[in-house]
Each structure stands twice: as C-alpha cells, then as structure tokens.
Image (cartoon, grey):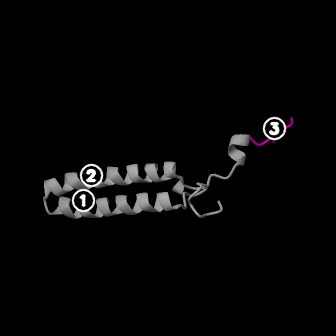
Amino acid sequence: MSQKTEIDPIFAEEVGHGNSIAAWTCVLIMTIGFIVGGIAFANHAHTLVYISCGVVVLGLLMGWVMKKAGFGVGGSRSGASH
C-alpha cells in the first residue's frame, strides 16, 4: 500500500502572522476598546460600554481600510519585506 505524499499547493505557501502596520493599528484600537469597555462594564456605565463596542468595530474597519491602502502584509506601503 503506497501513501500519497504530495503536498496540496494551498497548504504549501506560508500563512504569515499579520505583522504589519495595519494589523498592529487594528489590534491597538480594539485592545483600547476592550479595556475601556471592561472598566465601564464593571462600573455600570452602560453608555460607555456601547461606545467601546463602537471603538472595537472602528478598529476592525481601520485595519481593513489600512490593508486596502497597502499597509497590510506584503502591501506596497508596509515597508516590510514579507
């Protein structure tokens, strides 16, 4: 019985870790949103919790926009040689 040892081309390329300006900006904004939201939740500041949820979504959108602008992994403006 012989086993198939050929590697699927989809799994052959390196995935990367998202180490880019866009990824770090996204994570930073979302982390601030989570921290402020957690403190606000503990202090029963409902309005600030909802604002913090908006900041988390804003961070996600900023990461996406920056990736499209070329600041993502392998982007033209990222300054990295990934």
User: In 3D space, how far apart are the residues under numbered discs 2 and 3 (Cα atoms)?
Assistant: 48 Å
The answer to which of marks 2 and 3 sits earlier in the sequence is 3
User: In 3D space, how far apart are the residues under numbered discs 2 and 1 (Cα atoms)?
Assistant: 7 Å
Asked if residue 6 is among those painted magenta in the image, a careful observer would answer yes
Q: Looking at the image, which residue sits at the far right?
A: 1
- Left or right: 27 in relation to 39: right
**Is 5 or 20 nearer to us in this picture?**
20
Q: Which residue is mark 1?
A: 37
Q: Which residue is mark 3?
A: 4
The local secondary structure at tag 1 comes to helix
Asked if residue 28 is among those painted magenta in the image, a careful observer would answer no
Q: Which mark is residue 21?
A: none
Where, quadrant-wise, is the C terminus in this rendering? bottom right
Q: Are marks 2 and 1 in contact (CB under 8 Å)?
A: yes
- Left or right: 2 in relation to 19: right
Nearer to us of marks 3 and 1 is 1
**Is 22 or 7 nearer to us in this picture?**
22
The local secondary structure at tag 3 comes to loop
Q: Which residue is mark 2?
A: 53
Q: What's the amino acid at mark 1?
A: Gly
Where, quadrant-wise, is the N terminus in this rendering? top right
At x 13%, y 58%, the residue is 45
User: In 3D space, how far apart are the residues under numbered discs 3 and 1 (Cα atoms)?
Assistant: 51 Å
Q: What's the amino acid at mark 3?
A: Lys
**Picture coordinates of residue 23, whole percent (x, y):** 48, 58
Q: Quadrant of residue 46?
A: bottom left
The magenta span reads 1-8
